[in-house]
Structures are given as C-alpha cells and as structure tokens.
C-alpha cells in the first residue's frame, strides 16, 4: 500500500534542509524516494513495536539526509563516476592488500609515502586494519574501539587519515576500512557511562543484575575465544552487572534491539563513508542480533539490519560498497548477499572463507575432492555481488565447511580435520608447515589454525633446515595458493608481508597485550631492509614478489577474470588437479591447479567439454602456446604448478 505519510516526511526533511530536489540533488531525491518504502519496511520489521518507533524513524530520515548534506562534493562526484562504470565492484582490475598501519610502516603519514610500493606490486585497494582509538593492551588488534571517530594517536590523526585518503584517491587507490558494529571497548564513552549507572547507556548493551538470563543465553551460545576469553558474559565490578562479551571480556556487545543504538551506528557508518571509504568492512555482522535459545549467530534480524544499512547507504553515500565479514558455514555466508526480494541487496561482498579453507585442505592432502564437493554451495552467490578472495588474512583459518563435503570426498570428517590441524600445526610427521592451533576448545577439541602463508607453505622450516629444494617447493605452493584465489572471481585481497614471503613473527610473545593470542604470529612487523630484496633477483623475496606481481598484472589484463557469475568447474579427471573455466563473451580462460607433490596428468579431453573444442591455448603464466592433443594424450603438470590458459 502506498504510504503518503512517508514521502511527506521525506519531503519535509529535504525542504527544511534546502535540498534542491529538482536540480543538483535530484539523483539523491530519486534514490531516497525509490528506497523509502524498503527502509520503512525493514525498520518496522525490527522496531515497529518499540514505544518510540515513530520518533526514532524521523531521526533515521534526518540521519540519511544529514549524511548526504555533509558528503564532500568530490565524493558525490566519485559516486556518480562509479555509477557510470557499471558495477565497479565486479572488476578484474582491483587487487587489495590488508595491513596494520603501525606494523607495516609506523603511521598514516608514513603510509602516504609508501604508495609507490603498492603501485609497484599492482595493488589498488588498501584495507587499513582498525585505526580508531583503542586501549593499548586490550585492543584485539584495534577491534575494541574506544572512540569510533578519533584516530588513535599511535597512527596519527583524523587529518592524517584524510590526507592519506586524498592522496590515494589521486593515485586511483581505493580505501577499505572497518566498522566494528557488534561491540565497543569497555573504555568507550557509552560503556563508561553505563558503568557509572546511566540507564540510557546501560540500554546500549546487554546488562543483567543476576545470572538468570546470561545462563539462558550460555546454554546455546558457542564460545568464540574459549582459551583466552571463555564464556559470553563478564561481571562489571563498577555497576555490578553481567555484561554480554561474546569476544573478549573487554569488548561489550551492543544491543541492536534498541533502535537508538542502530541510529548511532548508522551515523557512524555515514561518518566513515564521508571520509572517503570505498568499501566498508562490517566486522562480525553474524553476531549483531541476540536471542536466548539460539546460537546468537546469523539470526534473521541480523540480515534485516544489514539490509537496512545497505538501503540507507545506497541513498546517501552510494559509492561505498559493503563487505560483510561473516566467517560462517557456506550456506550461511551466502545469505549475507541477501535472499528473496533482497537478493544482491544486502552486502556487496563477503569473504570467500570456504574456498580459502578448502585450498588449505587441498594443499595438505594433495587431493582436491573436498574442494570440489563444496562448490555447489559457493556457486550460489548471486550475480551483482562479489567475493573477497584470499589465502591468508589477519585472522585464523577455520575449517568451517560442512561435514557432508568431507564425507562426499570419502573421508571421515573428524579424522580429516584432525589431520589438517596437526599438519598445519606442524605436529603431523613429515609436515613442512609451521603454524599453531588457535582457540582450542577443551570441551569439543575444536580448533582453528594460525600461521603465515609462507610458514604454512613450508618456507620457515625449509629455510631453517637449509633445504633449497624445499624452499623451491614452498615458493611454488605460495604462488599456487595465490593464483587459485586470484582467478576464481572476486577481489583478491593480499595480506601484507605475504607478497615478500614473510614467515611467522614470534615477537608477539614478549608483549603482554598480545601474547595470549597467537594470531599475532602471522601479523608481521615489516623490515624495510629485508624488503629491499624484492629487487634482488634470485632471492626468495624477489621470487615471491615478482610472481605475485605477475599474477596481478595478468588478471588486470583479462576482463574474463571479473566476477560476472562466469565460472564453471571442470569435471574432475584427476583428484590432484582442480580447474575452472571462466567465460565472458568470446573469451575463455581455463585455470588449472595441481595440488600434488607429484607430476600430474590431465587428459586433453578435459578441455573439450565446454562448447566448441579449442585448438590452441595460451598460457599467461608460462607465456607459451599449447596445441590441444588427443583425448588419450595428456597435459603434464609438474608438482604444485598451475596454468592460466586462454583459448586462442
Ligand atoms: C572479526 C575480526 C577479528 C576480531 C573479531 C572481534 O572477526 O576479524 O580479528 O577478533 O571480529 O572484533
């Protein structure tokens, strides 16, 4: 039913703010009216029964209008440019790198002077790990935010961030940053006021005077950091209440059943948008709605919140894409792209965490069957949304794919995961990997894996063991892992240090604020003297850097590598080899990967199963042509090799 009151409200707000709906601001006005019904519907679904829902809805409309009014002209222009590009997020020309500013080069000022490094490599999207104010020692790498709008002095100032953004924009480098939506630090002003007994702010969190409700929650909520932060509630001695703290005891969960919290955080999202963020990484969205009797993860209301955010962003700051950091089971990840009427209208991006973990599975076993068994789910991603693809990031590797995928490949899920954990922790006899188990749950024996790309691929052990052949294999594994994630569709996101073969950094063990969290082993402090070796032919650093750089430049040349729901897996002919075909108009690209320590053979028939049989293939990786042979002949793949073959 048409809701005239809603459009009247919008018109009043726009009129009051002198928005020129027939002129300069017409596009904004059109977007607002087009999205208003959805915004109202989603808001009402969450808060329709709240006693102050009408008043707070007006605040929501004001917040959207204010964001647009405050949006700098240059960003409004950029919004339009992105619209003209079509769906810019699907492009094959974007490659990202995620980094800790302090560990990479010190601070934001110095980072602005390092843009040459990214240009050299071909990276044109930077994900800055959290830089907003966060208490030293209780920061969870910046994910415990004490002030959402103040840059921590360790990194510089807001002005430095703005200068960096302008410089990056001038050099066509996109910016990605986080909004930590689920929680604040217990030093955040809201938490401090709540501790002082202020009722308004106590309602921003989940706080209880006794254990009744916390016990109810605990019955069904899993623990995220069972070793370092067991349980989901923390006793606040100041206000004598139990506070929900799903992650660390110093990260207080925000209560989104209170619409005021939603408005505050939406306003913060707009504040970030107007700093010039191109992709907003929404941290831990799976957790933002809680309900006793559930796991408090992936609840339908969490999706309603994300859809509401997406609609509001689309109206006021449309050039900012949203990445939902949902590292959950494959079926659940998919829902973050939206379902039903909201298909491809929730998060623009999600991490392809399933594929990432499956690549590690294939690398350890030399067998690609589990990876293939999972693809049916991964391929459900809707057109118009995309993945962030990666091999390593700042977090641990979770083996969260479904048991049936492992069973379909013929393995026992428990034994299979046990093997993988032991392999990467370096406990399994003969394993070249050097990682560690993260967050072992003593009750379930569940665990994830920490360790850098290089160390998990064997580089640390082979360098220590003075084993040049082993080093060669490790380098091949590193590039194999990167190549598979680079061409599979979505924006490849490198993790800083991996481009130069950084092995684990154990200095975290001497820092009390970090030593309890072994994820720090794969968050290196960059040594710029060592990095000079990327220029020295023959060094490990040079081999990895130049290989990574070539992969980036090959991908940038091939429009077919863009993410247009244009991927088909090749039917399996050899369990060690996984291959997919990318197609776009006339362009066809076969990407094949040998996960085995042995030479593998792939029948030429494998290339003839998708439309007209090709005659020649050009390998962009090895820069050579192949002529397709007979079905009883083989394409030969050395250990851990891969090919990026374009049909000619
Ligand atoms: C996300 C971050 C992780 C952090 C957690 C809590 O999962 O990636 O590093 O510990 O959220 O904020």
Image (cartoon, rainbow, N blue to C red):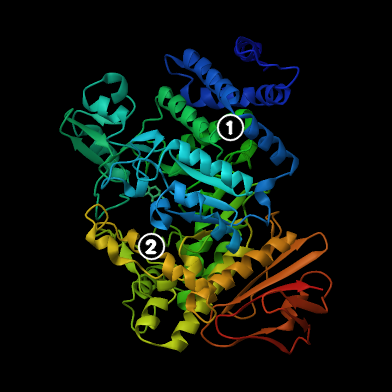
With respect to residue 590, does 236 lie above or below?
Answer: above
Kindly identify the residue that appears in the image at 67 percent across and 51 percent down: 90
**On the picture, is 355 further left or further right than 105?**
right
Question: Residue at (22%, 39%) from the top-left corner?
Answer: 234
- Residue 498, compared with residue 539, is above or below; it is above
The image position of residue 1, as x and y in percent, is 67, 17
Q: Quadrant of residue 374?
A: bottom right
Cα distance between the residues tagged 2 and 1 = 34 Å
- Residue 410 left/right relative to 78: left
The mark lying in front, picked from 2 and 1, is 2
Q: Is residue 407 visible?
A: no
Name the spot of residue 333 as percent of width and height, x first: 52, 50
Q: Is residue 64 left or right of residue 201?
A: right
Q: Which residue is mark 2?
A: 524
| Location of residue 195 with respect to 345 vertically, above or below | above
Under circle 1, the secondary element is helix
């Amino acid at each position: 039913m048409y809701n005239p009151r809603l459009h009247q409200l919008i018109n009043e707000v726009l009129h009051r703010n002198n928005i020129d709906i027939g002129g300069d601001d017409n596009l904004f006005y059109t977007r607002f009216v087009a999205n208003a019904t959805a915004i109202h519907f989603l808001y009402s679904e969450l808060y329709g029964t709240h006693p102050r829902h009408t008043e707070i809805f007006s605040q929501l409309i004001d917040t959207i209008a204010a964001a647009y009014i405050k949006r700098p002209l240059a960003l409004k222009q950029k919004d339009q440019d992105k619209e003209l590009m079509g769906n810019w997020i699907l492009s094959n020309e974007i490659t990202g790198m995620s980094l800790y500013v302090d560990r990479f080069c010190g601070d934001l000022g110095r980072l602005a002077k390092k843009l040459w490094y990214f240009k050299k490599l071909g990276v044109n999207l930077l994900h800055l790990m959290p830089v907003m104010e966060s208490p030293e020692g209780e920061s969870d790498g910046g994910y415990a935010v004490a002030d959402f709008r103040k840059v921590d002095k360790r990194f510089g100032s807001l002005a430095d961030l703005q200068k960096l953004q302008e410089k990056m924009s001038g050099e066509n480098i996109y910016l990605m940053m986080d909004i930590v939506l689920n929680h604040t630090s217990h030093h955040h002003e809201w938490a401090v006021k709540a501790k002082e007994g202020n009722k308004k702010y106590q309602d921003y969190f989940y706080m209880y005077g006794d254990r009744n409700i916390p016990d109810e929650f605990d019955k069904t909520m899993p623990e995220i950091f069972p070793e370092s932060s067991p349980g989901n509630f923390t006793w606040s001695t100041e206000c004598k209440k139990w506070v929900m703290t799903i992650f660390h005891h110093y990260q207080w969960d925000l209560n989104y059943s209170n619409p005021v919290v939603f408005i505050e955080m939406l306003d913060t999202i707009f504040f970030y948008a107007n700093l010039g963020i191109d992709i907003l990484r929404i941290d831990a969205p799976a957790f933002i709605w809680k309900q006793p009797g559930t796991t408090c993860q992936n609840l339908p209301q969490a999706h309603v919140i994300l859809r509401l955010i997406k609609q509001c962003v689309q109206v006021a700051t449309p050039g900012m894409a949203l990445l939902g950091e949902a590292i959950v089971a494959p079926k659940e990840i998919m829902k973050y792209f939206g379902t039903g009427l909201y298909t491809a209208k929730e998060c623009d991006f999600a991490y392809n965490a399933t594929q990432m973990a499956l690549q590690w599975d294939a690398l350890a076993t030399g067998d690609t069957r589990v990876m293939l068994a999972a693809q049916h789910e991964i391929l459900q991603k809707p057109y118009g949304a995309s993945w962030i693809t990666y091999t390593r990031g700042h977090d641990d590797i979770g083996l969260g794919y479904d048991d049936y995928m492992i069973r379909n490949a013929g393995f026992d899920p428990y034994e299979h995961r046990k093997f993988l954990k032991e392999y990467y922790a370096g406990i399994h006899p003969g394993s070249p990997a050097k990682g560690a188990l993260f967050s072992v749950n003593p009750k379930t024996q569940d665990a994830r894996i920490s360790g850098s790309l290089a160390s998990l691929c064997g580089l640390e052990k082979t360098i220590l063991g003075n084993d040049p052949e082993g080093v060669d294999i490790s380098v091949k594994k590193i590039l194999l892992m990167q190549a598979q994630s680079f061409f599979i569709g979505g924006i490849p996101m490198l993790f800083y240090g991996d481009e130069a073969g950084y092995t684990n950094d154990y200095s975290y063990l001497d820092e009390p604020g970090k030593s309890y969290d072994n994820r720090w082993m794969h968050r290196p402090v960059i040594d710029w003297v060592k990095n000079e070796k990327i220029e020295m032919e023959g060094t490990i650093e040079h081999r990895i850097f130049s290989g990574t750089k070539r992969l980036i430049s090959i991908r940038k040349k091939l429009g077919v590598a863009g993410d247009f729901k244009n991927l088909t897996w090749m039917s399996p002919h050899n369990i060690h080899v996984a291959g997919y075909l990318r197609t776009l108009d006339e362009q066809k690209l076969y990407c094949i990967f040998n996960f085995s320590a042995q030479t593998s053979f792939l029948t030429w028939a494998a290339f003839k199963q998708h439309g007209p049989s090709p005659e020649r293939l050009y390998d962009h990786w090895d820069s050579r042509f192949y002529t397709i042979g007979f079905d009883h002949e083989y394409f030969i793949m050395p250990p851990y090799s891969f090919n990026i073959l374009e049909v000619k």
